[in-house]
Image (cartoon, coloured by chain):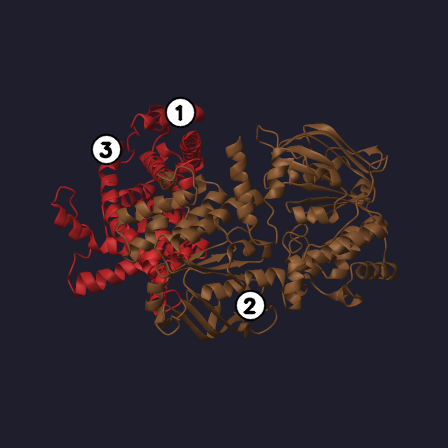
Chain colours: A brown, B red
Amino acid sequence: MSDPLVKVKNLKIGATVYPPGEKPHDIEIVHGVDFELEKGKVLGLIGESGAGKSTIGLSTLGYGRGGVEITGGEVWINGRDILKGGLGALRKLRGSEVTYVSQSAAASFNPAKKIMDQVTEAAIRHGKFSKSEAEKRAVDLFRQLSLPNPETIGNRYPHQVSGGQLQRCMTALALCPQPDLVVFDEPTTALDVTTQIDVLAAIKQAIAATGVAALYITHDLAVVAQVSDHIMVLRNGDMVEYGDTDQIINAPREEYTQALVSVRSITHEEKKPTPEPVLTVKGINARYRGTNFDVLKNVNVEVHPGQTLAVVGESGSGKSTLARVITGLLPPRDGKIEFAGRNLSADLKGRTREDLRELQMIYQMADVAMNPRQTVGTIIGRPLEFYFGMKGKAKRERIQELLDEIELGTGFIDRYPAELSGGQKQRVCIARALAAKPKLIICDEVTSALDPLVADGILKLLLNLQKVEDVAYLFITHDIATVRAIADSIAVMYQGKVVRYGPKSQVLSPPFDDYTDLLLSSVPEMRLGWLEEVIEHRRMESAGN
Amino acid sequence: MPTLVKLLAQRIALGLLLLFLVSILIFAGTNILPGDVAQSILGQSATPEALANLRKELGLNDPVVTRYFSWLGGALHGDLGTALTSRLDIATEIGRRLGNTLFLAFWAAVIAVPLAIFLGLLAVRYRDRWPDKVISAFTLASISVPEFLIGYLLMFFIGVKLRWFPSTAISYRPDADLFTRLESIALPVAVLTFVVLAHMMRMTRAAILNVMQSAYIETAELKGLRMFTIIWRHAFPNSIAPIVNVVMLNLAYLVVGVVVIEVVFVYPGMGQYLVDHVSKRDVPVVQACGLIFAAVYIGMNLIADVVSILANPRLRHPK
């Protein structure tokens, strides 16, 4: 058998960290990883944040982001150890033999240059193609990636095309110099699901057509199952399991892999609506100041006591604007908000302290929703003082009760947010909302920034708390799996309108309207061949029409 | 591109409004100065009748607002009045000297701007290594030493000791051939270059370093491009706006702030003209110079604003 294209042996990667209040020191973030990749094959690297997957991906270009450095091991590509050649040799490798597709194409394209110049630059600079050859190749790739107007899209600037299109342009950029290996680093993570499926299909087809080998990095096992031949599961810089895609998905050996595969298995029995909703939103139209179009168009929804309404939609659908309207941050143009049997003032200034107390919020970014200079105790204690005038021992006891409720020990009371993990921070935010003893909590994408397993824990906690505290949630999310897990009723939003609304069982069963159908069928499923099925199904449907 | 046109029109209108306000400030400022123009022309021994006659002749008895508008109206038509001391037409006099000042500023800019940007790029390329440190130290030193001192030092070593260039610009004649003219301004140009270099270079370095943090610089690195190619082709085009701003500020300084250099080198430009007439209390000349300096400053900043707007691809190429 011939040598593999990529052979990584005992790869060790370190970084210098600068913890506040301590001396800078070196830590190891990847502890000796081995893998091989044959020509034309796709290896999926999967793991949670901090697993070292991007770092390993970039090491095949001999690159370390920030203070990251390869400290040991060998990386062989095309029969050469690329770590031995020095910077000059690496420069010949990058953009020629190995190329890179990043998570955010919007940030990775130079805003001041035309797409075509950026796509062809590496191929021309490395002398692989002349300018005209490279441009012809780029247009072919644009066509292969199903970009609209492949002949002329290259003349546009990055801000003139959509996010999904730009991500495909980035793939064209990586494929243009005819590399042997492409590193895809979460290429679809920042996209909406309905866009993700198209980009995923385009990438898969382009890989097949060009015969290039690829490293596909993602945290989403369902996505990687669609494109890769083999999967390597990583955790905290160590390899957990390696196997072909079928085995990893259907017969995972390691406990951690099993947990990843069975994530989102929370089930929640739907509750019947009560006669008196806690929140009623009636005929809301809203627009932002200085604009002349409505971001919300005639929105009507209800939330019942002790139940969860999931508001689901893609970016720009108006779901977060709805939260702003309900909290009074954005007074609507017309419409009414009834809360706990009374009319809520449209403007925040007109609301009583009782209104504020009974309606709490939890945000996506727990990091920035807390004052980094306050301890957990101060953060949770603030609403206790503000709403209930609690002081001293009573306050401290209540804080400890709340910490118990969110499954954090009393030891956390004197910690600062910087000393907590992402999931723990979100728990503290939940405790702060609960401290006010609210009737309704608005949860705005509260699990979106978290790793799947951590997100699962948060969702379980929220469900338990709902039982204990009898609090209602208005749960804003773009993730259908989350909706399935926790909702009692669902509102699907699209372009500022509620296109589908009702109890979960009804909203998630056919017959569907076109948008809900598209949305639901675009959510990657954790089985092989799902992507082909959906694409085939859609092609048949459009042919049938 | 309606947004672009609107933005540009707004900037230009703002510039004109600002110039108008500055003209009021200059006029008001020169009017509240203590002393009396007629008195300063005729001296302490003047008879009250002669003073009264002169005031009437100069229109000093009219209300301030009337005088302001007749002055402004004249200025808009290119009539800046006559100098009280020499009885010469200010516009012709300034025209000659402004030409000289612009000649000096132009050559200083031709050398200083590209040099500053090149040094800035070089400093980024060798960031935190010795070329960066040498450039930083040198430019910092040159900006810290007062410009007249640099002027006298150059005069002494290059003009007097080495005799490479004339030590003063007193021999400058606008009608001489270009080479002679350049030779006579060599030293003042060198001093001006030293003075403006540091600011522009440091700003260029900072602006490009800021852009070097962007994700698209990583993309360029992963294309295997050379560092200098990355800086020049990918970072520089995105840092034009702040660089142009600091360049324009320094160009304005080259025109307006050269007073000291012109006096040191006895160069017949605007600065010297202004200094001469300030000491003679020749108010109309001071007003005219003030107005022109203000116009240059505002104009340069206007150009900087316009270039910054045009440098933004989102405005140049709307969706």
Quadrant position of residue A116: top left
Residue A478 x %, y %: 63, 45
Q: Distance between the residues labelled 1 and 3?
A: 21 Å
Residue at the (29%, 28%) spot, across then down: B78
Q: Which amino acid does label 1 sit on?
A: Phe
- For label 2, the crowd category at 10 Å Cα-Cα, with few meaning under 14, some 14 to 19 and many 20 or more, is many
- Secondary element at tag 3: helix
The chain carrying label 2 is A
Tell me, yes or no, if residue A328 can be seen here: no
The answer to which of A118 and A42 lies nearer the viewer is A42
The dot on residue B92 is 3
- For label 3, the crowd category at 10 Å Cα-Cα, with few meaning under 14, some 14 to 19 and many 20 or more, is some
The chain carrying label 1 is B
Quickly name the residue at label 1. B69
The answer to which of A210 and A289 lies nearer the viewer is A210
The dot on residue A242 is 2
The quarter of the picture where the C terminus of chain B appears is top left
**Disc nearest the viewer among 2 and 1:** 2
Mark 3 and mark 1 in contact (Cβ < 8 Å)?
no
